[in-house]
Each structure stands twice: as C-alpha cells, then as structure tokens.
Amino acid sequence: MFRSIEFRAYCHATEDEDRVAKAIATLCPEGAAQKDTFEGHHKNPIVLIACRIERAEEISAFWKRCRDADLVRTILEDLPKRIDDDGVLHLRFDKQEAYEGRIELARHEDVVAVRAKASAFPAKKSALIRAAREYLAKV
C-alpha cells in the first residue's frame, strides 16, 4: 500500500547536525541519512538531512512505531486533509521530541517532515484514502 516513506529535517546553523540526525533515526532507524548543504537567505548554512525507506518491512515498522505512540487514530481522523492528489500522505513530527526518543505529531514549525507515497487502483484520491485507511486500521 505504501511504496516509500521519506523523512526530512532542516538543520539550521544554531542546531547540531548529530541531534537532528538522531531525531530522524527515532522515526526511521532502518534508513541511512543523507545530508545536503544549502545557503540560507542571509548566507547562513542550512543542512537538509533526509532518509528514505522502500522495503515493506521497514515501512511496516514505521507504522507500528506510530501505532505504539498512539498516533494512528489521529492520523486516520485527518487522512483526507493529509493525502494529496498524487497519493502522498504528509505528516509532521516534533523534531525535539524525536531527538528525545518520543514520536509525536508536531504543533509548530520545528519538524521532521514525512512523505509516505501511497498506491491504489484506481489512482484516485478517494481510492488512495480508502486504501490508506484500511492499511493503517490493520497496523
């Protein structure tokens, strides 16, 4: 049902890269983090730390971590708002909480952004929502 999941977080000049990488590892311990460096508007360095998983076992393990953190119900409630027309489920997790080893949905801008690519037939938003709902209800 989910073909891949991508985890991304920005590390600003005032943050420690290892701490941001640890936050991503809380959500995705199976993946290998990749780093890209950019220059901000004020010439400050910004590092994008990203991780991608595609194996079914790894994807299932992520959703089980969400279930164990009691987040699946909340995700299911907002599912139609979180899935776009391309079948991408968008989630935002609290980066500071993830660094501390806890998985919580974010209520602010300091996040690990997650994009879970769903697939269904037909590839319509309604079918994608239905398939995602069925999958997440079984996690």
Image (tube, rainbow, N blue to C red):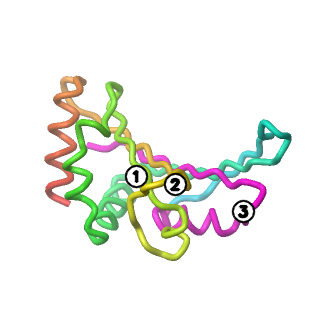
Amino acid at pointer 2: Val
Q: Is residue 93 shown left or right of residue 60? A: right
Amino acid at pointer 3: Glu
Mark 1 sits on what residue?
A: 55
Disc with the residue nearer the chain's start (3 vs 1) = 3
Mark 3 sits on what residue?
A: 15
User: Which residues are the magenta region?
Assistant: 1-30
Q: Is residue 16 magenta?
A: yes
Q: Is residue 61 above or below residue 50?
A: below
Depth check, mark 3 against mark 1: the one in front is 3
Q: The residue tagged with tag 2: helix, strand or loop?
A: strand
Mark 2 sits on what residue?
A: 112
Q: Which residue is more in the foreground, 93 or 68?
A: 93
Instruction: Say few, some or many: other residues with alpha carbon within 10 Å of mark 3 (under 14 / 14 to 19 / 20 or more).
Output: few
- The residues bearing labels 1 and 2 have C-alpha atoms spaced at a distance of 20 Å
Q: Is residue 92 shown left or right of residue 15? A: left
- Tell me residue 66's x, y (percent): 32, 63
Please name the residue shown 17% across and 30% down the image. Answer: 127
